[in-house]
Image: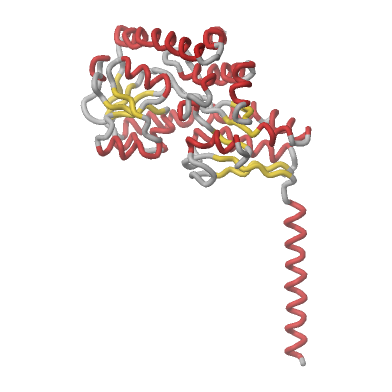
């Protein structure tokens, strides 16, 4: 009898605990949860999204959660815009150069030698571009709304083998380069390829490509620096445009207070990102020294030779995109005016 009573009490206690856990879970569960598709792992590149999620949760008392999904848990990196378009998830980072035909208006920011000098300028210019009607319309084709940029520093090349100390040294070199940087490298005789970020270390290490253009954080994250013996310190050919986009339908369905919280979280998210990137650069310089990597500094004459190759690329972009119905010259002029401030 005692044994039976004891077991009965234990069952009652366990049931009470289970109910308490359920109620506690329900009490603290978010009212709205958005899945956010990212790739790779947490790194400087994703710190704007990390801070965004933190800010949104704080501003809504945990009622609006951005659930960050790394690796390729939700989608491959090149398919994030497609995922947004058919509602597979509510938010994602994308890179315009992964699918330039799907977001041609954004590729204006990937043209080489635009003259962007820092992340603050790049962030400001991108946010202004996102408001342009042609850009809004371009993204609307994918049910996507641009929320904020992931302002990327100027890409430079890390590579293996003989260091290219002048423009002619790139002739015939296979390089990992996307977007406008890829066009620029093709113009100087290199052979650009679109190897994915996660495959780039192996590509350099095996000799499939000689060099890759990344921002410093990506050279660290994807370990290309470990396969390289030189780096182009001051080439600064351009960068890529990798915004955070959200499903327009999902955004429109949010309560107004959640929309406000999301929009107001953008500024602190970008401020945090830029601070993190300052710290990343400190680590980058130290890594170059520790690995005894040659830092190539091009002369003014060599840089001018590179820049001269950019003009025709800008003209070709305007011609191609205008033929496709985009107000390309207007967008390029707008970006250049914004850069000048």
Q: Is residue 292 visible?
A: no
What residue is at 73 percent from the left and 73 percent from the top? 14
Q: Is residue 317 left or right of residue 2?
A: left
Above or below, comparing residue 14 to residue 107 in the picture:
below
Q: Position of residue 16 (x, y in %)?
A: 77, 70
Q: Position of residue 251 (x, y in %)?
A: 70, 33
Q: Is residue 260 visible?
A: yes
- State how many labels appear: 0
Above or below, comparing residue 328 to residue 271 in the picture:
above
The quarter of the picture where residue 216 lies is top left
Q: Position of residue 284 (x, y in %)?
A: 40, 31
The quarter of the picture where residue 137 lies is top right
Q: Position of residue 255 (x, y in %)?
A: 78, 36
Q: How is the image coloured?
A: secondary structure
Say which quadrant the C terminus sits in: top right
What residue is at 34 percent from the left and 7 percent from the top? 304
What residue is at 50 percent from the left and 24 percent from the top? 241
Q: Nearer the viewer, residue 327 or 50?
A: 327
Looking at this view, name the residue that lies furthest to the left: 162
Q: Nearer the viewer, residue 248 or 47?
A: 248
What residue is at 65 percent from the left and 42 percent from the top? 34
Above or below, comparing residue 341 to residue 207 in the picture:
above
Say which quadrant the N terminus sits in: bottom right
Q: Is residue 120 left or right of residue 219?
A: right
């Amino acid at each position: 009898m005692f044994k039976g009573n004891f077991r009965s009490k234990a069952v009652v206690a366990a049931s009470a605990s289970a109910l308490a856990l359920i109620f506690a879970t329900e009490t603290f569960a978010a009212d709205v949860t958005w899945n956010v598709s990212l790739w790779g792992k947490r790194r400087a590149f994703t710190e704007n999204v990390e801070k965004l999620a933190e800010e949104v949760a704080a501003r809504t008392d945990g009622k609006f959660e951005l659930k960050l999904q790394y690796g390729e848990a939700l989608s491959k990196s090149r398919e994030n815009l497609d995922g947004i378009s058919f509602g597979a998830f509510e938010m994602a980072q994308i890179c315009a150069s992964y699918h330039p035909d799907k977001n041609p208006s954004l590729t204006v920011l990937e043209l080489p030698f635009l003259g962007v000098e820092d992340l603050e300028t790049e962030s400001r210019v991108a946010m202004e571009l996102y408001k342009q009607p042609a850009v809004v319309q371009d993204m609307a084709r994918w049910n996507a709304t641009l929320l904020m940029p992931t302002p990327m520093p100027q890409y430079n090349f890390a590579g293996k083998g003989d260091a290219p100390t002048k423009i002619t040294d790139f002739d015939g070199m296979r390089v990992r380069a996307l977007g406008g940087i890829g066009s620029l490298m093709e113009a100087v005789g290199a052979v650009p390829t679109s190897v994915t970020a996660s495959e780039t270390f192996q590509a350099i290490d095996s000799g499939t490509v000689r060099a890759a253009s990344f921002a410093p954080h990506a050279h660290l994250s994807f370990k290309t620096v470990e396969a390289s013996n030189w780096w182009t310190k001051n080439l600064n050919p351009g960068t890529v445009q990798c915004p955070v986009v959200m499903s327009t339908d999902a955004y429109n369905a949010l309560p107004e207070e959640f929309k406000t919280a999301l929009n107001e979280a953008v500024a602190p998210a970008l401020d945090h990102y830029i601070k993190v990137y300052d710290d990343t650069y400190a680590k980058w310089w130290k890594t170059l020294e520790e690995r005894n990597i040659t830092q190539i500094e091009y002369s003014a004459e060599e840089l001018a030779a590179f820049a001269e190759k950019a003009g025709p690329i800008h003209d070709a972009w305007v011609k191609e995109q205008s033929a496709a119905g985009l107000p390309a010259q207007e967008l390029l002029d707008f970006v250049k005016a914004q850069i000048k401030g």
